[in-house]
Image: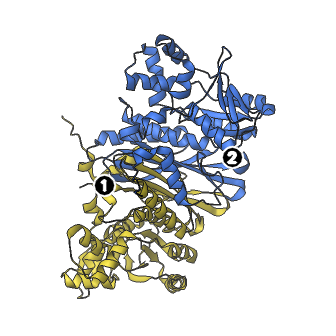
Chain colours: A yellow, B blue
Amino acid sequence: LASKVQTAKELGEDRIRSIIIKHLGRDPREILGYGDDAIAFRLDGGKVLVAHTDVLVGSTDILPGMNPFYVGWKAVVMNVSDIVSKGAKPLSLLFSWGIPRDLQSRNISKIAEGMGAAARKYGAYVAGGDTGEANDLFLAGTSFGIAQEKELLRRSGAKPGDILAVTGKFGLTSVGYKILLEGFRAPIYVKRAALKAVYAPSARLKEGLVAAKTRGVTASMDCSDGLARSLHYLSKMSGVGFRVTNVPIAEEACSFASMHLLDEAELALYQGGEEYELILCVERDAWSRVYTAIRASGGKLYRIGEATPEKKLLLERKDGSTQKIEPIGWEHFKKWH
Amino acid sequence: LASKVQTAKELGEDRIRSIIIKHLGRDPREILGYGDDAIAFRLDGGKVLVAHTDVLVGSTDILPGMNPFYVGWKAVVMNVSDIVSKGAKPLSLLFSWGIPRDLQSRNISKIAEGMGAAARKYGAYVAGGDTGEANDLFLAGTSFGIAQEKELLRRSGAKPGDILAVTGKFGLTSVGYKILLEGFRAPIYVKRAALKAVYAPSARLKEGLVAAKTRGVTASMDCSDGLARSLHYLSKMSGVGFRVTNVPIAEEACSFASMHLLDEAELALYQGGEEYELILCVERDAWSRVYTAIRASGGKLYRIGEATPEKKLLLERKDGSTQKIEPIGWEHFKKWH
């Protein structure tokens, strides 16, 4: 029997990850388990070290027109977001840089400036790193932070009946991609908001830390992989389904959807990504406490549905019809295809 | 005045690092400071978190004939080495992978296997990571470990009069590079030892941990950048010079040097690199204690010279002549040129 040689392109990202995980072995001391946003290890005094690595690759992750300052900025935000989604306060970041020979000095400076500015926004610094020559620009970051073990937020704790909520409105990165990658037109105020969302995102630091303190949040993750795909991860890790009744859409994305006759819910669920809003599952009894705490910290919390015992993901439309939420999103067309 | 646009290639690695560091800002909570092998942060109970990132890039760091298993192996060793050189016990590793579209499934498996095997050799696992499509294969690792703050080994503590020592013999990686990259011939027993040194290196875990416990080691680093260059870093960070009188050379490297009429000391100082021996500076009064402790743990320690008040690096030859040790090495021709 001839064995077929498969390439990375044919395998796709999910199967590549499975192959890697299978060969690495499983550390019994690691608390969160494969499939969560970060790794966590016990320290003294009831604390845990939470760490995460995320890489930004020039040829696949840098959008047209992106200022090098925001390349550095975004590389930090994507790393910070995954540890704050676990309720960990950022301690520090490290970056390994892959630098093409022809990258200009001023662009190196701007990337580093953007990194420094974003790190300080979240109370940390990029404290070290490594550089190597590479054909592709890449910024491989690691963020680490400290959480109380009792407060650690996981992907795996949601229970049927929990309220499903998000920390912000959706749709702007979808609009940004449509403008930048598909040539859609938009009025200036829409374009400005959409490009800000894709170029200069924010991580939800205070929301993550406050959510952890309430002890009423059963599961948490960011939705950098897009809302639909992130909901599927959360469903799989928690063993629950979700009924989504109402996704908050940014006003500019509503205008854009009307203008181009696009479906708002589809924009929000499938065509976005690299949105760093947190998805939280909240115990029904704790809802008003969690809501009040996040609002008091200056954050926002929108109830979008609930967790269900049946492991299905359903979108309930305003007209009463329901449809399945598919596990696809931005990553689906961006990478490995 | 026209300002000249400089590229990464023209800047070179050291100036690139300076530019990056200048723009990142300095975290006052970080203990070791720029220029050391790792970063360190205080935890509870007198402990410190030590972390390091090191990237292996396919187009510049993978030697001809290197089995993918050892690509993964080496990516772990280079990350572990820098934290054990600080006296920290490895806790965990993370890797961001850049994967070219045509990389074969079996090679992905082998790289992951090599990572897993190397990590377990040092009492840890690769507990997580990220993957992205890239034009260049890269493995950007982060290692972290825990040390007692009082025992933390730095690059910056050497004092004049300290004994300079290394944990192993030199010359084998130089021979390996000459065979693989410059077409030198060698008898099979030399070739085998040299290729083992470049393909399947080891980090000096027990030596680092034991050295830290003795409290008699004033400075420590690994010599992955080559012996001469590493001595220069240690000199700069500690504000001392070194007189080197005797570098231990592996027997196979001696044979190779004789055969090709090469200078042994030059092989060891300038033409090696990616050797993960530790360079230790040891208080004169503590020498026999440190030596005994490392020998008792199964490690080796060779006295190669001493630290001097004058910040010069000198090699004293057997014939009594002395010459300056230049700050050059393997990296000098490998990267950014």
Residue A54 spot, x, y in % from top left: 42, 57
Query: What crowding class fits label 1: few (fewer than 14 Cα within 10 Å), some (14-19), or many (20 or more)?
Result: some
Report helix, strand or loop for mark 1: helix
For the residues carrying marks 1 and 2, which lies nearer the camera in this image?
Answer: 1
The answer to whether residue A120 is seen in the rendering is yes
Circle 2 residue: B152
Residue B101 spot, x, y in % from top left: 27, 47
Circle 1 residue: A59
The answer to whether residue A50 is seen in the rendering is no
Q: Image quadrant for the N terminus of chain A? A: top left
Query: Which mark identifies residue A177?
Result: none
For badge 1, the amino acid type reads Ser
> Does residue A223 appear to the left or right of B224 in the view shown?
left
View extreme (front): residue:
B1
Q: CA distance from mark 1 to mark 2?
A: 40 Å
Based on the displayed image, in which of its 4 quarters is residue A170 positioned?
bottom left
